[in-house]
Image: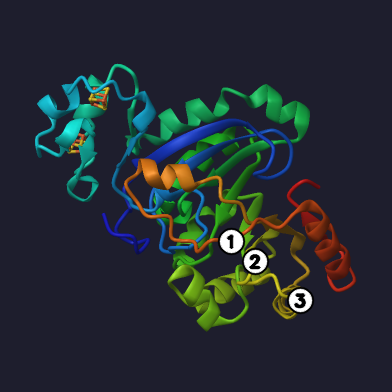
Amino acid sequence: MKEDGKNMETSKGMVSDSKRMSVHDGPGIRTTLFLKGCPLRCLWCHNPENLQTKPALSFTRKLCIGCGACARVCPGGLHSFPGKEHHIRFDACSGCGACTEECLPGALKLYGREMEPKEAARLLLEDRDFYVRSGGGVTFSGGEPLLQPAFLAEVMKLLKKEKIPVAVDTCGDVPWSAFLQVLPYTDLFLYDIKHPDSAMHKKGTGRGNERILENLENLHKQGAAVEIRTPVIPGYNDDPGTLRCIASLLNGYDNITAWRLLPYHSMAKGKYEALGLQYPMPETSMPDDTRMRAVRTELSALFPAVKLSSD
Ligand code: SF4
Ligand code: SF4
Protein backbone atom coordinates (compact mmCIF):
# COMPACT_ATOMS: atom_id res chain seq x y z
CA MET A 1 0.00 0.00 0.00
CA LYS A 2 1.32 3.46 -0.90
CA GLU A 3 0.81 6.62 1.13
CA ASP A 4 -0.79 8.75 -1.58
CA GLY A 5 -4.42 8.35 -0.63
CA LYS A 6 -5.28 6.46 -3.83
CA ASN A 7 -3.77 3.06 -3.33
CA MET A 8 -5.37 2.28 -0.01
CA GLU A 9 -8.87 2.06 -1.50
CA THR A 10 -9.81 -1.20 0.14
CA SER A 11 -12.75 -1.43 2.48
CA LYS A 12 -10.50 -3.03 5.13
CA GLY A 13 -8.57 -0.54 7.23
CA MET A 14 -5.06 -0.66 8.65
CA VAL A 15 -5.66 0.38 12.24
CA SER A 16 -3.06 1.05 14.89
CA ASP A 17 -4.94 1.46 18.14
CA SER A 18 -7.98 2.94 19.83
CA LYS A 19 -8.35 5.20 22.86
CA ARG A 20 -11.53 5.22 24.93
CA MET A 21 -12.69 8.07 27.19
CA SER A 22 -10.69 10.64 25.27
CA VAL A 23 -11.47 14.28 26.15
CA HIS A 24 -8.93 16.01 23.87
CA ASP A 25 -10.04 14.83 20.43
CA GLY A 26 -13.20 16.89 19.96
CA PRO A 27 -16.27 17.71 22.07
CA GLY A 28 -17.38 15.54 25.02
CA ILE A 29 -16.19 12.02 25.77
CA ARG A 30 -14.96 10.21 22.68
CA THR A 31 -13.37 7.05 21.39
CA THR A 32 -10.50 7.77 19.03
CA LEU A 33 -9.50 5.27 16.37
CA PHE A 34 -5.92 5.66 15.12
CA LEU A 35 -5.22 4.71 11.50
CA LYS A 36 -1.83 3.92 10.01
CA GLY A 37 0.14 5.98 7.49
CA CYS A 38 0.93 9.69 7.17
CA PRO A 39 2.18 11.87 4.27
CA LEU A 40 4.00 14.22 6.67
CA ARG A 41 7.06 13.71 8.86
CA CYS A 42 6.65 16.38 11.54
CA LEU A 43 9.76 16.69 13.70
CA TRP A 44 7.57 16.81 16.83
CA CYS A 45 5.24 13.91 15.86
CA HIS A 46 3.93 12.21 19.00
CA ASN A 47 2.48 9.16 17.21
CA PRO A 48 5.54 7.80 15.35
CA GLU A 49 4.06 4.28 15.48
CA ASN A 50 1.54 5.46 12.88
CA LEU A 51 3.87 7.04 10.32
CA GLN A 52 4.21 3.95 8.12
CA THR A 53 1.24 2.17 6.58
CA LYS A 54 2.70 -1.24 7.46
CA PRO A 55 2.60 -2.62 11.03
CA ALA A 56 5.33 -1.24 13.31
CA LEU A 57 7.16 -3.34 15.91
CA SER A 58 7.73 -1.78 19.32
CA PHE A 59 10.12 -3.14 21.98
CA THR A 60 10.03 -2.15 25.66
CA ARG A 61 13.50 -3.10 26.86
CA LYS A 62 12.71 -3.05 30.58
CA LEU A 63 10.09 -5.80 30.12
CA CYS A 64 12.42 -8.18 28.26
CA ILE A 65 13.62 -11.20 30.28
CA GLY A 66 16.00 -12.39 27.56
CA CYS A 67 14.25 -15.75 27.02
CA GLY A 68 15.04 -15.74 23.27
CA ALA A 69 11.57 -16.95 22.22
CA CYS A 70 11.32 -14.09 19.71
CA ALA A 71 14.60 -15.08 18.03
CA ARG A 72 13.37 -18.66 17.58
CA VAL A 73 10.29 -17.64 15.56
CA CYS A 74 11.41 -14.58 13.59
CA PRO A 75 11.56 -15.61 9.90
CA GLY A 76 14.14 -12.91 9.17
CA GLY A 77 16.45 -13.72 12.10
CA LEU A 78 16.13 -10.12 13.25
CA HIS A 79 16.49 -10.68 17.01
CA SER A 80 19.99 -11.25 18.38
CA PHE A 81 21.70 -11.02 21.77
CA PRO A 82 25.26 -9.80 21.29
CA GLY A 83 26.84 -9.44 24.74
CA LYS A 84 23.45 -10.32 26.32
CA GLU A 85 21.97 -7.05 25.00
CA HIS A 86 18.79 -7.67 22.96
CA HIS A 87 19.28 -6.23 19.47
CA ILE A 88 16.52 -5.95 16.83
CA ARG A 89 16.98 -5.03 13.15
CA PHE A 90 13.86 -2.86 12.97
CA ASP A 91 14.65 -1.69 9.43
CA ALA A 92 14.21 -5.22 8.05
CA CYS A 93 11.05 -6.08 10.03
CA SER A 94 8.08 -7.08 7.86
CA GLY A 95 5.63 -6.65 10.73
CA CYS A 96 4.51 -10.29 10.62
CA GLY A 97 3.92 -10.24 14.38
CA ALA A 98 5.24 -13.78 15.05
CA CYS A 99 7.63 -12.59 17.78
CA THR A 100 4.96 -10.55 19.58
CA GLU A 101 2.83 -13.68 19.99
CA GLU A 102 5.70 -15.55 21.67
CA CYS A 103 6.74 -12.76 24.03
CA LEU A 104 5.09 -13.65 27.33
CA PRO A 105 6.15 -10.52 29.31
CA GLY A 106 4.71 -8.27 26.59
CA ALA A 107 7.99 -6.56 25.69
CA LEU A 108 7.09 -6.77 21.99
CA LYS A 109 4.01 -5.13 20.55
CA LEU A 110 2.81 -4.63 16.99
CA TYR A 111 1.06 -1.40 16.00
CA GLY A 112 -1.15 -2.11 13.02
CA ARG A 113 -3.66 -4.72 12.00
CA GLU A 114 -6.31 -4.99 9.34
CA MET A 115 -9.85 -4.37 10.45
CA GLU A 116 -13.21 -4.77 8.72
CA PRO A 117 -15.52 -1.72 8.86
CA LYS A 118 -18.11 -3.70 10.86
CA GLU A 119 -15.53 -4.70 13.46
CA ALA A 120 -14.38 -1.09 13.80
CA ALA A 121 -17.96 0.16 14.15
CA ARG A 122 -18.71 -2.48 16.81
CA LEU A 123 -15.69 -1.35 18.82
CA LEU A 124 -16.57 2.32 18.43
CA LEU A 125 -20.18 1.81 19.51
CA GLU A 126 -19.18 0.24 22.85
CA ASP A 127 -19.15 3.62 24.62
CA ARG A 128 -22.21 5.12 22.96
CA ASP A 129 -23.87 5.85 26.33
CA PHE A 130 -20.93 8.09 27.24
CA TYR A 131 -21.17 9.89 23.90
CA VAL A 132 -24.87 10.56 24.38
CA ARG A 133 -24.48 11.84 27.95
CA SER A 134 -21.44 14.04 27.24
CA GLY A 135 -22.17 15.33 23.74
CA GLY A 136 -19.20 13.30 22.53
CA GLY A 137 -18.72 10.79 19.74
CA VAL A 138 -16.05 9.12 17.66
CA THR A 139 -12.84 10.67 16.29
CA PHE A 140 -10.69 9.21 13.54
CA SER A 141 -7.03 10.11 13.91
CA GLY A 142 -3.65 8.71 12.99
CA GLY A 143 -1.31 9.02 11.24
CA GLU A 144 -3.57 10.50 8.64
CA PRO A 145 -7.00 8.82 8.57
CA LEU A 146 -7.88 10.27 5.16
CA LEU A 147 -5.23 8.06 3.54
CA GLN A 148 -7.88 5.34 3.94
CA PRO A 149 -11.04 7.16 2.81
CA ALA A 150 -12.98 4.10 1.58
CA PHE A 151 -12.63 2.32 4.93
CA LEU A 152 -13.38 5.52 6.81
CA ALA A 153 -16.56 6.18 4.84
CA GLU A 154 -17.76 2.61 5.43
CA VAL A 155 -17.25 2.86 9.20
CA MET A 156 -18.81 6.32 9.30
CA LYS A 157 -21.93 5.12 7.47
CA LEU A 158 -22.41 2.45 10.14
CA LEU A 159 -21.93 5.03 12.93
CA LYS A 160 -24.32 7.47 11.30
CA LYS A 161 -27.03 4.80 11.21
CA GLU A 162 -26.70 4.88 15.02
CA LYS A 163 -26.66 8.70 15.06
CA ILE A 164 -23.11 8.92 16.47
CA PRO A 165 -21.32 12.28 15.93
CA VAL A 166 -18.08 11.85 14.00
CA ALA A 167 -14.90 13.96 13.84
CA VAL A 168 -11.87 13.54 11.57
CA ASP A 169 -8.46 14.68 12.81
CA THR A 170 -6.47 15.48 9.66
CA CYS A 171 -3.23 17.11 8.55
CA GLY A 172 -5.10 18.16 5.40
CA ASP A 173 -2.39 16.97 3.00
CA VAL A 174 -4.47 14.45 1.04
CA PRO A 175 -6.30 14.64 -2.30
CA TRP A 176 -9.59 16.58 -2.12
CA SER A 177 -11.32 13.43 -3.40
CA ALA A 178 -10.58 11.81 -0.01
CA PHE A 179 -12.44 14.62 1.78
CA LEU A 180 -15.37 14.24 -0.61
CA GLN A 181 -15.77 10.59 0.38
CA VAL A 182 -16.21 11.38 4.08
CA LEU A 183 -17.84 14.84 3.95
CA PRO A 184 -21.45 13.57 4.10
CA TYR A 185 -20.76 11.76 7.39
CA THR A 186 -18.38 14.17 9.16
CA ASP A 187 -19.68 16.56 11.83
CA LEU A 188 -16.33 18.21 12.57
CA PHE A 189 -12.87 18.33 11.03
CA LEU A 190 -9.95 18.82 13.42
CA TYR A 191 -7.56 20.45 10.97
CA ASP A 192 -3.86 21.19 11.48
CA ILE A 193 -2.31 24.48 10.42
CA LYS A 194 1.32 24.19 11.46
CA HIS A 195 2.96 27.05 9.62
CA PRO A 196 1.62 29.68 7.19
CA ASP A 197 4.85 29.78 5.16
CA SER A 198 5.30 26.86 2.76
CA ALA A 199 9.11 26.71 2.98
CA MET A 200 8.94 26.65 6.79
CA HIS A 201 6.15 24.08 6.63
CA LYS A 202 8.42 21.88 4.55
CA LYS A 203 11.26 22.38 7.00
CA GLY A 204 9.16 21.16 9.93
CA THR A 205 7.03 18.49 8.24
CA GLY A 206 8.80 17.43 5.05
CA ARG A 207 6.15 18.96 2.75
CA GLY A 208 4.90 22.40 1.74
CA ASN A 209 1.46 23.63 2.79
CA GLU A 210 -0.15 24.39 -0.60
CA ARG A 211 -2.55 21.43 -0.68
CA ILE A 212 -3.42 21.93 3.01
CA LEU A 213 -4.47 25.55 2.41
CA GLU A 214 -6.35 24.58 -0.76
CA ASN A 215 -8.32 21.89 1.09
CA LEU A 216 -9.09 24.36 3.90
CA GLU A 217 -10.54 26.70 1.30
CA ASN A 218 -12.56 23.81 -0.19
CA LEU A 219 -13.94 22.87 3.24
CA HIS A 220 -15.03 26.48 3.67
CA LYS A 221 -16.84 26.42 0.33
CA GLN A 222 -18.63 23.25 1.44
CA GLY A 223 -19.65 24.88 4.75
CA ALA A 224 -17.96 22.09 6.76
CA ALA A 225 -17.37 22.74 10.47
CA VAL A 226 -13.63 22.95 11.16
CA GLU A 227 -11.61 23.29 14.36
CA ILE A 228 -8.07 24.42 13.57
CA ARG A 229 -5.22 22.95 15.59
CA THR A 230 -1.74 24.43 15.78
CA PRO A 231 1.05 22.67 17.65
CA VAL A 232 3.06 25.49 19.25
CA ILE A 233 6.69 24.55 18.66
CA PRO A 234 9.34 26.75 20.31
CA GLY A 235 11.74 28.23 17.77
CA TYR A 236 9.59 27.07 14.84
CA ASN A 237 6.18 28.75 14.89
CA ASP A 238 5.80 30.33 18.34
CA ASP A 239 6.94 33.83 17.41
CA PRO A 240 4.23 36.53 17.42
CA GLY A 241 4.59 37.21 13.67
CA THR A 242 3.91 33.60 12.66
CA LEU A 243 0.98 33.13 15.03
CA ARG A 244 -0.56 36.46 13.97
CA CYS A 245 -0.20 35.40 10.35
CA ILE A 246 -2.17 32.20 11.08
CA ALA A 247 -4.82 34.28 12.92
CA SER A 248 -5.29 36.55 9.93
CA LEU A 249 -5.52 33.55 7.58
CA LEU A 250 -8.26 32.03 9.76
CA ASN A 251 -10.17 35.30 9.90
CA GLY A 252 -11.10 34.76 6.27
CA TYR A 253 -13.26 31.75 7.18
CA ASP A 254 -16.62 31.72 8.94
CA ASN A 255 -16.78 27.90 9.26
CA ILE A 256 -14.06 27.71 11.93
CA THR A 257 -15.51 26.78 15.31
CA ALA A 258 -12.26 27.23 17.27
CA TRP A 259 -8.49 27.61 16.90
CA ARG A 260 -6.78 25.38 19.43
CA LEU A 261 -3.13 25.87 20.42
CA LEU A 262 -1.39 22.66 21.47
CA PRO A 263 1.90 23.19 23.33
CA TYR A 264 4.89 21.10 22.24
CA HIS A 265 5.81 18.23 24.56
CA SER A 266 8.50 15.58 24.39
CA MET A 267 6.53 12.72 25.95
CA ALA A 268 6.83 10.63 22.77
CA LYS A 269 10.62 10.26 23.12
CA GLY A 270 10.26 6.81 24.68
CA LYS A 271 8.06 5.66 21.78
CA TYR A 272 10.79 6.52 19.27
CA GLU A 273 13.31 4.46 21.22
CA ALA A 274 10.90 1.50 21.41
CA LEU A 275 10.36 1.66 17.64
CA GLY A 276 14.09 1.74 16.93
CA LEU A 277 13.87 5.34 15.66
CA GLN A 278 15.92 8.45 16.42
CA TYR A 279 13.92 11.25 18.08
CA PRO A 280 14.08 13.86 15.27
CA MET A 281 13.34 17.01 17.28
CA PRO A 282 16.34 19.07 18.37
CA GLU A 283 16.58 19.69 22.13
CA THR A 284 13.58 21.92 22.84
CA SER A 285 11.94 23.00 26.08
CA MET A 286 8.18 22.78 26.49
CA PRO A 287 6.23 26.07 26.65
CA ASP A 288 4.81 26.44 30.17
CA ASP A 289 1.19 27.26 31.08
CA THR A 290 1.93 30.93 31.80
CA ARG A 291 3.49 31.39 28.36
CA MET A 292 0.60 29.59 26.64
CA ARG A 293 -2.00 31.69 28.47
CA ALA A 294 -0.16 34.88 27.46
CA VAL A 295 -0.10 33.74 23.82
CA ARG A 296 -3.82 32.97 23.95
CA THR A 297 -4.60 36.39 25.43
CA GLU A 298 -2.59 38.18 22.77
CA LEU A 299 -4.10 36.21 19.89
CA SER A 300 -7.68 36.48 21.16
CA ALA A 301 -7.65 40.13 20.07
CA LEU A 302 -7.10 38.91 16.50
CA PHE A 303 -9.12 35.68 16.58
CA PRO A 304 -11.57 35.48 19.52
CA ALA A 305 -12.20 31.72 19.26
CA VAL A 306 -8.58 30.88 20.13
CA LYS A 307 -8.29 28.20 22.85
CA LEU A 308 -5.70 26.11 24.63
CA SER A 309 -5.81 22.31 24.81
CA SER A 310 -6.90 22.65 28.46
CA ASP A 311 -9.89 24.94 27.61
S1 SF4 B 1 7.43 -8.83 13.54
FE1 SF4 B 1 9.44 -8.38 12.63
S2 SF4 B 1 10.91 -8.94 14.22
FE2 SF4 B 1 8.94 -9.90 14.78
S3 SF4 B 1 9.01 -11.98 13.88
FE3 SF4 B 1 8.05 -10.66 12.35
S4 SF4 B 1 9.75 -9.95 11.04
FE4 SF4 B 1 10.66 -10.77 12.93
S1 SF4 C 1 10.38 -13.03 23.67
FE1 SF4 C 1 10.11 -11.08 24.73
S2 SF4 C 1 11.05 -11.42 26.73
FE2 SF4 C 1 11.80 -13.08 25.40
S3 SF4 C 1 13.75 -12.26 24.58
FE3 SF4 C 1 12.14 -11.74 23.10
S4 SF4 C 1 11.49 -9.66 23.71
FE4 SF4 C 1 12.64 -10.51 25.42
Location of residue 69 with respect to 81 vertically, above or below:
above
Whole-percent x, y for residue 242 in the image: 69, 78
Q: Earlier in the sequence, mark 2 or mark 3?
A: 2
Judge depth for marks 1 and 3 and give the one in front: 1
Between the residue at mark 2 and the residue at mark 3, the CA separation in whole angstroms equals 11 Å
Q: Earlier in the sequence, mark 2 or mark 1?
A: 2
Q: Nearer the viewer, residue 185 or 142?
A: 142
Q: Quadrant of residue 254?
A: bottom right
Between the residue at mark 2 and the residue at mark 1, the CA separation in whole angstroms equals 7 Å
Residue tagged by mark 1?
Answer: 284
Q: Nearer the viewer, residue 15 or 280?
A: 280
The figure's colour scheme reads rainbow
Location of residue 307 with respect to 196 vertically, above or below:
above
Judge depth for marks 2 and 3 and give the one in front: 2
Q: Contact, CB < 8 Å: mark 2 with mark 3? A: no
Q: Residues within 10 Å of mark 3 (few under 14, many from 20)?
A: few
Whole-percent x, y for residue 49 in the image: 40, 45
Ligand 2's quadrant: top left
The N terminus sits in image quarter: bottom left
Between the residue at mark 1 and the residue at mark 3, the CA separation in whole angstroms equals 18 Å
Residue tagged by mark 2?
Answer: 234
Whole-percent x, y for residue 71 in the image: 14, 29
Check disc 2 and give the amino acid type.
Pro
Residue tagged by mark 3?
Answer: 240
